[in-house]
Image (cartoon, rainbow, N blue to C red):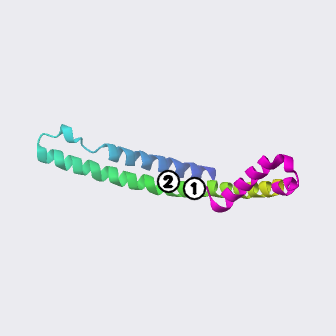
Amino acid sequence: MTTAETTAIANDEQRRLAELVAWRDSAPHPDDQPSPKAQERAWADRQQRMGRWRGFEESLTTKEKRTRQRVPLVDTQTDLLAAKGYLENLLANLADDRDRFREVDAAKAGLDALRRGI
């Protein structure tokens, strides 16, 4: 695909998106209608257009939402595994040092929280 074709597609998409926004915004306002029945019809038309627009927006952002949710989980798991390794290493190094018993207790509590949850 050439640059000109890519530009043409992008311009066409922008034009169509602008048409969709204009269609959404062209719904008559219920307060501008002369009768209660016309106000109800205008309200229903406006709600229908906004519902379709929200569905369109949701379909565009679904992939982005799923991608954003997965990344922190992987980072969190990596961080927890690193913390577990650090605490186990700290306990191994401090096992014979009686003067640092508070650090040993804190490391044990941290490992317990990692294993069982807080």
Tell me the residue that label 1 is attached to: 69
Q: Position of residue 90 (x, y in %)?
A: 82, 53
Q: Is residue 99 magenta?
A: yes
The residue furthest bottom is 115
The residue furthest front is 98
Between 8 and 40, the residue placed more toward the observer is 40
Res 1 visible? no
Tell me the residue that label 2 is attached to: 61
Mark 2 vs 1, N-terminal side: 2
Between 75 and 111, the residue placed more toward the observer is 111
Judging from the image, what secondary structure is the residue with disc 2 in?
Answer: helix
Range shown magenta: 91-118
Between 113 and 73, the residue placed more toward the observer is 113
Q: Does residue 17 appear left or right of residue 27 in this picture?
A: right
Q: Is residue 111 magenta?
A: yes
Point 33% across, 43% down: residue: 25
In front of the other: label 2 or label 1? Answer: 1
Vertical order, 113 against 23 (above or below): below
Q: Does residue 68 appear left or right of residue 58 in this picture?
A: right
Q: Indicate the quadrant containing the N terminus: top left, top right, bottom left or bottom right.
A: bottom right
Inter-mark Cα distance, 2 to 1: 12 Å
Q: Position of residue 75 (x, y in %)?
A: 68, 54
Majority secondary structure of magenta residues: helix
Q: Position of residue 20 (x, y in %)?
A: 38, 49
Label 1: how many Cα within 10 Å (few below 14, some 14–19, many 20+): few
The amino acid on which the numbered mark 1 sits, given as a three-letter code, is Gln
